[in-house]
Image (cartoon, rainbow, N blue to C red):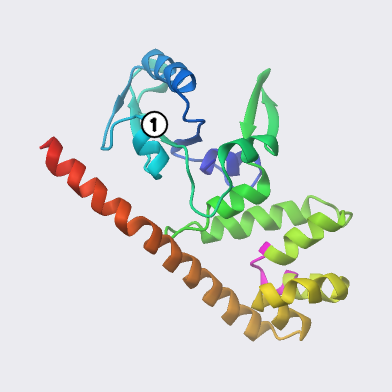
Amino acid sequence: MGGQACVFYGAAEFSRDLDLLILAEPQNLDRFRSGLRDLAAEPIAVPPFDSRHLARGHAADFRCHRKDVAGLRIDVMAVLRGVARFEELWSRRTTIEADGEPIDLLGIKDLVDAKKTQRDNWPMIRRLVEQNYFSSGGDAALDRIEFWLRELRTPELLVRMAEAHPSLARDVAPHRPPVEAALRGDIAAVERTLQAEEEEERRRDREYWDPLKTELEGLRRAKH
């Protein structure tokens, strides 16, 4: 669900860790613990790895010590802000094959939503959507065009899409000010509203994480 997924989508060259979204049900958590043992992975932070904390939206973080993956960090979550429940995400996942093994990724739309945080993910979001746009070769279904109108963060491309698909752009514009500006061909206004959009998402993410950070502080104090 993180940088490794972006690598597979062609929007990044590397990622230093592995971010996983898992189904937090007892049997699945047991299977995951077995995998952690196989990797000689140890927890590196609070909270502990259990369904209660995962359901609250916390991440469990591990460092691998098995020789072939020594130093790899694995971050695990079960709930993401602004993103659907696991079952729905699973139903629209993207599955690729690498070295004969299937790898399940968040669908591109869900991955973009998951990256909208207060962290510096925004250049990555831009590359993700650009890559999706350019890889289409200009031939796309309406739902994909709507995705670009809703998520493109490149002003020139957003204006181009609004000019090419004015009716659909007018449908999206009431829900996204950058598209409204793109319909006018106002690049400066597109840039301003994209920045405002990013700042609002960062604010929402801070608001979401503030109580969770307070919980983490309490867990750290209790541990020490």
Give residue 131's position: percent from left, percent from top: 70, 53
Please identify the quarter of the rendering in which residue 125 is found.
bottom right
Give residue 16's position: percent from left, percent from top: 44, 39
Residue at image location 79% in from the left, 55% down from the top: 144
Quadrant where the N terminus is found in the figure = top right
Asked if the stretch drawn in magenta spans residue 161, the answer is no
Q: Nearer the viewer, residue 136 or 165?
A: 165
Residue at image location 45% in from the left, 65% down from the top: 204
- The secondary element bearing badge 1 is classed as helix
According to the picture, the residue beneath numbered tag 1 turns out to be 51
Q: Nearer the viewer, residue 169 or 164?
A: 169
Q: Nearer the viewer, residue 89 or 55?
A: 55
Residue 3 can be seen, yes or no: yes
Give residue 56's position: percent from left, percent from top: 38, 43
Quadrant where the C terminus is found in the figure = top left
Give residue 202's position: percent from left, percent from top: 45, 65
Magenta stretch in the rendered image: 151-157
Q: Give the left or right position of residue 1, taking residue 95 as reference.
A: left
